[in-house]
Image: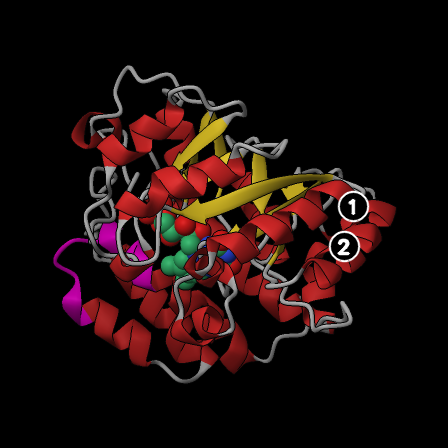
Amino acid sequence: MKQIFAPMEGISSYIYRRLHSGFFGGVEAYFAPFIAPDGEGGFKASALRDILPENNLGIVLIPQLLVNRPEPFIHVARELAVMGYAEVNLNVGCPSSTVVSKRKGSGMLLDLESLDSCLNEIFSRSPVAVSIKTRMGVESTEEFPRILEIYRKYPLKRLIIHARARSGMYKSPVDIPGFLSALGNAPWPVYYNGNFFSPGSAMELGLDGISLAGLMLGRGAVADPALPRSLKGGPALTAEELKDFHDALLSGYLDAGYDPRSAMARLKELWFYMLCKFPDSRREAKTLLKSQYLPDYRSAVSALFDSGKFSSECYFSQ
Ligand SMILES: Cc1cc2nc3c(=O)[nH]c(=O)nc-3n(C[C@H](O)[C@H](O)[C@H](O)COP(=O)(O)O)c2cc1C
C-alpha cells in the first residue's frame, strides 16, 4: 500500500520534507501545506518558496490549494503547471473557524450545490490533474453519501478521506464504517487518513486486510518520522536517528535564514508530537519547551536524549 505524507501547516515545510525524505523516506509523495490565494490568485512569497521545484528536489510534491471559488484555483494551477506540477490538491477538509466561515476547506461542504458548480469549473478548466482531500461532512459523517455523489461526477486523480466530520476537528473517533462504504465502487484511488499512528493502527482501526490505494500519514509520522518505514516492515526509529534528524532540522532552519527564536519555535511545534517517544519525561520536556535561547534549547535537547527515556515502542495517541 502506498503512503503519502499529509500536509501539515507550520510543520511539513520544504525544509522538513527534504530532510524527512533524506533521513527516512518511505513515502510516495508529500502533500504541501495549503496555499490560500487571494481572489486574483496572488499568494504569499513564503508559500511560493515552499513549493518552488528547486526547494523540493528529489521528492514528489503535490501542492494544495484552499479556495472557495474556481478562478483563483485555475489561476494558481496554471502557474503550478508551468513549474512542472502534474497534480494539485483541493483542500475540502480544513476545520478552522476562520477558514470555514469563508466557505473554504470543510466550509465548502456547507453548500453542496456551490461545491458542485465549483468542481465543475475546476475540473473542466484545470491544466493539471486535480485530487481532493475531504472531510466526511460538516456536522456529521452521515452527510458523506451526498458529498460522494458529487465527487463521483468528476475525474479525481485521487480522493483522500479524513474520516471525520468538521465538527470532530482532530479529536472525535474516526468513522471507519462510513469510510469503508465510500470504497465500494469508487471510480478513483481512495486514500485513508485519520489517527493512523503506529504499525498496530490498521488492526486497531479495523482497516486490516482492507484493500486501499494508500494511507495518508499526518501526526503519527510527525511524532515518529520512521513510521512510513516501519509500516513497510523496516526498522523502528532509534534515538540516534531522531537526534540527527532534529539537529539537521535546526541547522536547516537556521541556514535558511530563520532567526534562532523562529527556528526554535518551528522545532517546538514538532516536539508537541515527538515527545511521545520519551515517556515519563515531563521535567525534561518542560525545560525544553520553556527554553528561550539557542544554547539553552540545545542543552535541553541533549538532556532529553541523555535521559535514556527514548522508547521506539511509544507512538502518538490523542
Ligand atoms: C498542525 C496541523 C496542520 C495541518 N495542516 C493542514 C494543511 O495545510 N492542509 C490539509 O489538508 N490538512 C492539514 N492538516 C490535517 C492533516 O493533514 C491530517 O488530515 C490530520 O492531521 C488527520 O490525520 P492524522 O490523524 O494522521 O494526523 C493539519 C493538521 C495539523 C494537526
Q: Residues within 10 Å of mark 1 (few under 14, many from 20)?
A: some
Q: Position of residue 244 (x, y in %)?
A: 47, 50
User: What numbered label is drawn on residue 74?
Assistant: 2
Circle 2: residue type:
Ile
Q: Is residue 55 visible?
A: yes
Q: Position of residue 126 (x, y in %)?
A: 76, 45
Residue shown at 37% from the left, 36% from the top: 227
> In which quadrant is the N terminus drawn?
top left
Q: Secondary structure at mark 2?
A: helix
Q: Are marks 2 and 1 in contact (CB under 8 Å)?
A: yes
Which residue is under mark 1? 125
Q: Is residue 22 visible?
A: no
Q: Nearer the viewer, residue 155 or 2?
A: 155
Circle 1: residue type:
Arg
Q: How is the image coloured?
A: secondary structure
Q: Nearer the viewer, residue 8 or 23?
A: 8
Residue shown at 31% from the left, 75% from the top: 289
Is 165 contained in the magenta span?
Answer: no
> In which quadrant is the C terminus drawn?
bottom left
In the displayed structure image, the side of residue 219 where residue 175 appears, left or right? left
Position of 213 relative to 134 (above/below): above
Q: Nearer the viewer, mark 2 or mark 1?
A: 1
Position of 132 relative to 70 (above/below): above
Residue located farthest toward the bottom when viewing the structure as drawn = 292
Q: What predominant SS class does the magenta segment belong to?
A: helix
User: What numbered label is drawn on residue 62?
Assistant: none
Highlighted range, magenta:
272-283
Q: Residues within 10 Å of mark 2 (few under 14, many from 20)?
A: many
